[in-house]
Amino acid sequence: MKEPISCLTLEEKEKYMREAILLAEKAEAIEEVPIGAVVVLDGEIIGRGYNLREHTQQAASHAEMFAIEEACKRMGSWRLEGAQLFVTLEPCPMCSGALLLSRVDEIYYGAPDPKGGTAGTLMNLLDDERFNHTAYVESGVLGDICGQMLTNFFRGLREKKKELKKQKKD
């Protein structure tokens, strides 16, 4: 397993994850799945993103993709060497691929994704030595908060669907 290149304290990790959580709350406010992400370089947030898949109707409109894109624009390079990504939900295959291609060195996520996570749950694309880049991965940063946001969101969706179904019967 790859070691982190930075020496972030728990307090720093939680600080950046709280920023990702604020972005997840923005997504939730517009009825998107509450996922937020920030890219950090040298202690500064250089990219932010939140899930917009339903609004854009684009499969690639994930929080990580927007955060990486903004960070690359800000840095004037597709290489984000030395950067960390903080995301509320474990990255999917697409986002893990983008993280490898953009050379992000450390990934910190809150909640695991048992159906699509490729940063340790289903597999770990980010630590596969067959790729020309690998990244340090750490899970569970404010994981209870991140997981509860998702649980509450999907519970609310199920309740809305039940209510709509009930209204149609009446």
Image (cartoon, rainbow, N blue to C red):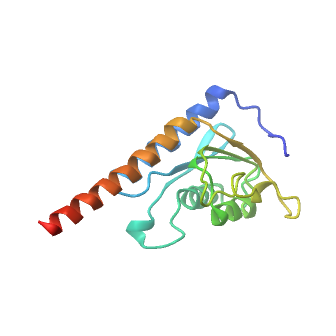
Q: Between 115 and 7, which is closer to the camera in this rendering?
A: 115
Q: Is residue 63 left or right of residue 118?
A: left
- Residue 136 location in percent, x, y? 78, 46
Q: Residue furthest left?
A: 170
Side (left or right) of 51 relative to 39: left
Identify the residue at horizontal 73%, vertical 53% (top origin): 104
Residue 42 lies in what quarter of the image?
A: top right
> Residue 76, position in %: x, y?
66, 60
Q: How many marks?
A: 0
Nearest the eye: 168 or 106: 168
Where is residue 96 drawn, in percent x and y?
68, 60
Quarter of the image where the C terminus is located: bottom left
**Residue 4: image x %, image y %?**
80, 40
Dividing the picture into quadrants, the one containing residue 115 is bottom right
The reply to whether residue 77 is in sight is no
130 with respect to 80 (left or right): right
**Residue 63 appears in the figure:** yes
Name the foreground residue: 61 vs 83. Answer: 61
Relative to 83, say whether 59 is above or below: below
- In the displayed image of the protein, which residue is found farthest to the front? 169
Q: Residue at 40% across / 53% down in the picture?
A: 154
Q: Residue at x 76, y 49 (%)?
A: 105
**Against 53, is 25 above or below?**
above
Residue at the location (50% across, 66% down)? Answer: 61
